[in-house]
Amino acid sequence: MENIKVWLVVLLIRFIYAGMQILSKAAFNDGMSVFVFLFYRQFVATLLLVPIAFVLERKRAPPLPFMVFFKMFLLALFGIAAGTDIYSIALSYTSATLSAATMNVTPVATFILAIVLGMETVKLKRYSGIAKVSGVVLCLSGILAMAFYRGPQLKALKHHPLFGHGDSHTNQARGDSKSTWILGTFLMILSNFLWSLWILFQEPLLKEYPSKLLFTTLQCVFSTIQSFFIALTCERDFSRWKLSFDISLISVAYCGIIVTGVSFYLQTWTIEKRGPVFFAMTMPFTLIITIIGSAFLLGELISLGSVLGAILMVGGLYSVLQGKRREHMDSNLPK
C-alpha cells in the first residue's frame, strides 16, 4: 500500500511539472513578458511561504550571520532569478516539449559540475565510471539532435489547441525559426546548468543554516526582489505588467502556489521515502505527459528531432543514475 501511495504522489508531481511547462508556454504565446512572469510567480510564492515560515519557525529559527545571508542572496540570484529568467526566454523561443526533455539533463549537468568542482570522481576502469561517461555522451548527443535536427512533424499528435489562437504554427512562430530554436535550446541547457550549480551549493549552505523552510523562504524573497529589478530593467512597457483574468493570471497563480507550494512538499516527502535517485528516475514521466498535453492543449507540432533528442537525454539520465547506483553498491562491498 505504501509503494502505491509513493507512485501516486510521484505521478501527481510529474503532472504538476508538466502543467508548469504547458501553462508557462501558453502565457508566453499569449504575449506575457517572461521577466514580468517570473516576478509575479516569485511574488505569489513569497506570499504563500512567508506566513507559513513565520508561524512555524519564528521561535526556533537559528541566527542568520551576514555571510550566510549574502551567500543565500547570491544563490537566489543565479539559481532562481537568472536561471528561471533564462529558462523562460528559452521556453518562449522553443516548446514545452523541449523544456520537459531538457529537465532530464539537470542530474547529468549536476554530475558534470561536481566533477569540475572536485566533488565527484570518475573511475573509467570500472563499470560505474563507464556508465557515467556514456550518460554524459548520450545527453550531449540528445542536445545536439534537438538543436540542429528538426525532421518531419508527427502529424498524429496534431490537435486543435485549447490555449492559443488555434494555429500551432502561429503559436510557435518564434520557435520555428531555426536560429531562434538553436539559441533557445542552448539557453535552456544554460538554465539547467545554473539550476545544477544551485543544487550543488545548497548542500554546504544548508549545513551552515539548517532550517530548510526558512532557507527556501528567504531565497524566494530574495529572488522576488531580484526578479522585480530585472523586469523593471528589461520590460519598460508597463502595459505588459497588467494581469487580466486569463491564461497569464492562471499560469502565475499555478506556478506560484501549486509548483512552489504543493510540489515542494510532495517532492521532499517522496525523496524522504524512496531517495533522490528514485525521484530522478521518474523525470521522464514529465516529458511524456508534456508531449501529449502540449500537442492537445497548445497545438505544438512534435518533430522527429525532438523525439530522438528526448530519447537520447532520457537514456543518458538512466545511464548516469545506473553508474551512481553501481558506485554506491561497490562502496558498500566488504574490503
Image (spheres, rainbow, N blue to C red):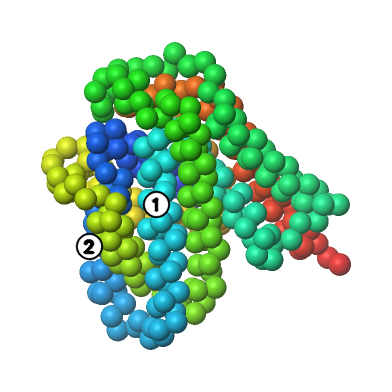
Residue closer to the observer: 218 or 266 = 218
Name the residue tied to disc 2.
Answer: 47
- Could you tell me residue 191's position as x and y percent? 48, 50
Name the residue tied to disc 1.
Answer: 84
Q: Is residue 34 visible?
A: yes
Mark 1 and mark 2: span between their CA atoms? Answer: 19 Å
Q: Earlier in the sequence, mark 1 or mark 2?
A: 2
Q: Tell me the quarter of the picture where residue 71 sits.
A: bottom left
Q: Residues within 10 Å of mark 1 (few under 14, many from 20)?
A: many
Kindly identify the amino acid type of the residue bearing the numbered disc 1.
Thr
Callout 2 secondary element: helix
Residue located 61% across and 49% down the image: 108
User: Left or right: 330 with respect to 266?
Assistant: right
User: Left or right: 67 with respect to 28?
Assistant: right
Residue located 24% across and 40% down the image: 32
Q: Tell me the quarter of the picture where residue 39 sits.
A: bottom left
Callout 1 secondary element: helix
Kindly identify the amino acid type of the residue bearing the numbered disc 2.
Leu
- Vertical placement of residue 132 versus 220, above or below: above
Residue located 35% across and 42% down the image: 20
- Vertical placement of residue 95 versus 330, above or below: above
- Vertical placement of residue 157 versus 104, above or below: above
Residue closer to the observer: 205 or 81 = 81
Q: Is residue 256 visible?
A: no
Residue located 37% across and 30% down the image: 174
